[in-house]
Image (cartoon, helix red, strand yellow):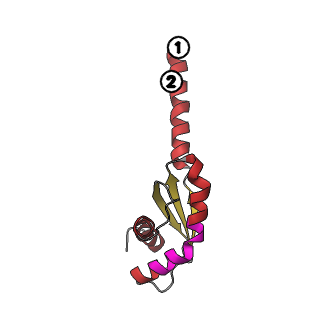
């Protein structure tokens, strides 16, 4: 038995391939510095949410709009690269886990300072 589900393995493969396509094949100068942080694939491999981190906050809306409009191009590139019966539908979303982690760190530091001050 494999150590983890097929959808997880497909998600890891899609993350690598989508990152390569966005960085090397998508030629839009409006796309700033982004990082593909993860891909969640449904168990039936029909739908994939691609999470990304964008360096500049002011570029988030533009970058998301560009990437979501380029999904058909990205899917066609994936179909050339991968031997899969079905290429999942792709949706790009902002990964908020980094911001959430920073917020938790700030709260923990605040609690630590308050406990040292008492």
Q: Is residue 13 left or right of residue 102?
A: left
Predominant secondary structure, magenta span: helix
Indicate the quadrant where residue 15 lies.
bottom left
- How far is the residue under mark 1 from the one under mark 2? 9 Å
Indicate the quadrant where residue 18 lies.
bottom left
Residue that carries the numbered disc 2 in the rendered image: 112
**Numbered label tally:** 2
Q: Secondary structure at mark 2?
A: helix
Q: Residue 47, image x and y in percent? A: 57, 73
- Asked if residue 47 lies in the magenta stretch, the reply is no
Residue that carries the numbered disc 1 in the rendered image: 117
Q: Residue 44, image x and y in percent? A: 55, 77
Asked if one can make out residue 79 in the rendered structure from this viewpoint, the answer is yes
Q: Residue 102, image x and y in percent? A: 51, 39
Q: Secondary structure at mark 1?
A: helix
Q: Are marks 1 and 2 in contact (CB under 8 Å)?
A: no
Which residue appears farthest toward the top when viewing the image? 118
Residue located 38% across and 68% down the image: 3
Towards the viewer: 34 or 91: 34
Which residue appears farthest toward the bottom when viewing the image? 85
Is 82 rendered above or below residue 57?
below
Q: What residue range appears in magenta? A: 67-77
Is 43 rendered above or below residue 106?
below
Towards the viewer: 5 or 49: 49
| Quadrant (top left/top right/bottom left/bottom right) for the N terminus | bottom left
Q: Crowding near pointer 2: few (<14 within 10 Å), some, many (20+)?
A: few
Residue located 55% across and 25% down the image: 111
């Amino acid at each position: 038995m494999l150590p983890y589900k097929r959808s997880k393995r497909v998600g890891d493969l899609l993350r690598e391939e989508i990152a390569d396509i966005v960085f090397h094949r998508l030629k839009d100068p409006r796309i700033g510095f982004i990082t593909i942080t993860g891909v969640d694939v449904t168990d039936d491999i029909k739908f994939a949410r691609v999470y990304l981190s964008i360096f500049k906050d002011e570029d988030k809306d533009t970058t998301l709009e560009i990437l979501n409009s380029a999904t058909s191009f990205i899917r066609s590139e994936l179909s050339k690269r991968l031997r899969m019966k079905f290429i999942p539908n792709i949706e790009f979303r902002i990964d908020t886990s980094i911001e959430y982690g920073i917020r938790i760190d700030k709260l923990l530091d605040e609690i630590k300072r308050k406990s040292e001050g008492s």
